[in-house]
Image (cartoon, rainbow, N blue to C red):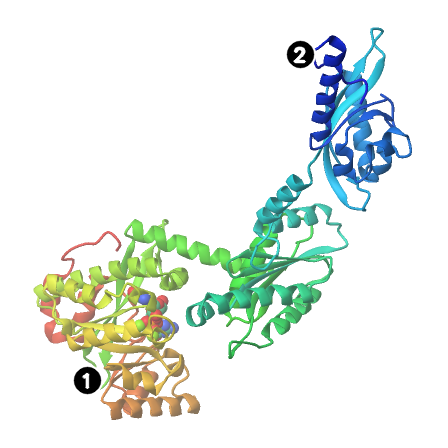
Amino acid sequence: MSGMLNTSQELAHQQDPDERFNMSTEILTTLINNVPGLIYAAEPKAPWLPAVISDGATGLTGYQAADFTSGRLTWTDIVFPDDLDNLRQAKARAHENRRLFSVEYRIMTRSGKIRWVLDRGRFTYDQSGEAVALEGFVSDLTEQKRAEECTKWAIYHDTLTQLPNRALFQKTLNRALDRCDPSSNIGLLFLDMDHLKHVNDTLGHDAGDIVLQTTAHRLRSVADSTSTVARIGGDEFAIILPHVTSNEELAALAEDVLDRLAEPFSFKGHSLDCCASIGASLVPSGTSGASELLKHAGIALDVARANGRSRAVVFNPTMLADVEHRATMLSNARRAITERRIAPFYQPKIVLESGRLAGFEALLRWRNPEGQMETPETIQAAFADARLAMGMGRQVLAAVIEDMRGWLEAGLEFGHVAVNASSAEFQSGRFAEQLLNSLRQAGVPTSCLELEVTETVFLGTGAEGVTQALRTLSSEGVRIALDDFGTGYASLLHLKQHPIDVLKIDQSFIRNLPSSPEDAAILSAVLDLGRNLGLTTVAEGIETAAQAEYLRAAGCDQGQGFFFRRPTPRDAVVDVIAAWQPHLAHRADDHRGHHDRPCH
Ligand code: C2E
Ligand code: MG
Ligand code: MG
């Protein structure tokens, strides 16, 4: 180990200088050779033939130090070819700038393994400024690199399925979009598992994990090598398809995926599948936004789920229009609630036999910012949103109760008022109690109120709560009407299981009377049913005298429709009472214009 010894001044000793010199050389040599890694002093020019190289060479490269010092092997021979340029440049830069260099690269060991190393050092110069040597230290970086790789892998992958995670999916998508050429579109499949939660809840998370892993495996098996399959959420997967030409091709691919996922497999004696709903979209021509592609696939996925799951839907622009329309409806409803621009209009219900007033149906109206009254159709979507539905329902009900209290105080015989309730309103679980409380506080008898529900409230989640609420209300004297009867499920079971008092026959069966024999037959069957079950029958949407007369003759109890009166603001109710209860007209006169609500 020559040429490296003049730095050992510290090792002063009692012996004579020669002995001291030998001693310190020995210590230093041992020290240098024991350092894990490789210390070298080499020629300043590539291939950097070493004059000195420590024994650490063997541990690091598998070759002996002598293999290098003898010139049998040069350092550049064992540098991984792809990394050689990098190493050369790092050293050239250090030489030029007279600075230290520090460079990471791979070497190939004698046994053929690839090892990462860190090479740090500097050039030394003579007095004329000429580089005379290259001195440095090479250490093993392999373990550190492996750990870094693992960490990097974990940052970008899902450990359960080994698939790329959302972060890598996003990166890959952006990269694919950057490369997108106009002739080949980027397709995206957005998958949402149909019943992972159910599997987790009933069979445990082990089973859920198996479903997810099987899904991942199946998705990889259907996707080709250019596609990226990623798990982007708990039960959400995505596939980036970089070469799709048309929506038709995309739809066919999505169907293949669905078929593969639907194949049953068994787990601990249970038959499971990986069924999912899929939303698919292609990069719209002319744009290349990842967020747009994702948004469109998400919209298509919502449609797939709404259409009954386990299906694939490819995005089309009308879906976006629908979503925007829906968003407008929700925002209109939200504003109308906070600005208290919601109030009921009242439409009379007439006893067909006597022509007397039976009561009213309260129908929601809201005043738009331009001051016009709008019907529920313009905020339809809000009835499916629990918070908004409750907000609207409360305002309507509060107004109805206040109006009934006023009419009762004025001695006006309005019969009853029917209010509509959507299934979302029952979700709080306190609907019945709150309603009864409000009536009690206002001193309005429960017999004045009727509650109209459609059969959809008996379906889906929360249906048991609805049954309970209706029973509570019914036992307290609130009458329950089944609205739009005949359009939904018209299940006789619903009539049997729930405390129904009134059947409201949907206007679609009335519209073509008396000329339609089919509608006449349906009407007759429903009237029979009502009679036999002791229910009051009400025909909706009566628009002509002929319809009213036909229904009366057929034995329908009550009628409601434009023929009698369109829904009217509360102030007009007194006129309605006067018109249909002439003997009570004087009381109506007294009450006319009694009090005002800002909405009217
Ligand atoms: P619905 O409960 O079946 O109400 C009857 C609908 O028929 C009302 O529409 C009414 O204006 C309309 N109508 C009445 N007579 C005639 C007629 O002769 N011909 C025709 N073509 N239509 C007639 P509206 O007020 O637009 O309400 C639509 C639906 O919105 C209601 O249907 C009900 O399901 C819902 N709705 C109304 N108010 C409320 C409410 O306060 N809460 C809830 N949850 N839903 C409501
Ligand atoms: Mg109704
Ligand atoms: Mg109806």
Residue 464 horizontal/vertical position (percent): 30, 74
Residue 589 horizontal/vertical position (percent): 12, 64
Q: Is mark 1 within 8 Å of ligand 1?
A: no
Seen at 15% across and 64% down, the residue is: 437
Query: Which amino acid type is shown beneath numbered disc 2?
Result: His
Residue position for label 1: 354
Hey, which quadrant is residue 242 in on the image? bottom right
Q: Earlier in the sequence, mark 1 or mark 2?
A: 2
Q: Is residue 319 visible?
A: no
Residue 177 horizontal/vertical position (percent): 68, 48
**In the rendered view, would you say 51 is above or below 374?**
above
Classify mark 2: helix, strand or loop: loop
Seen at 51% across and 60% down, the residue is: 322
Pick the quarter of the image with the N terminus.
Answer: top right
Residue position for label 2: 13
Compared across the picture, whether 356 is left or right of 102 comes to left
Residue 460: mark in rendering? none
Hey, which quadrant is residue 53 in on the image? top right
Seen at 73% across and 49% down, the residue is: 180
Asked if labels 2 and 1 touch by Cβ distance under 8 angstroms, the answer is no
Compared across the picture, whether 365 is left or right of 474 comes to right
- What whole-number distance in Å separates the C-alpha atoms at marks 1 and 2? 131 Å
Query: Which amino acid type is shown beneath numbered disc 1?
Result: Ser
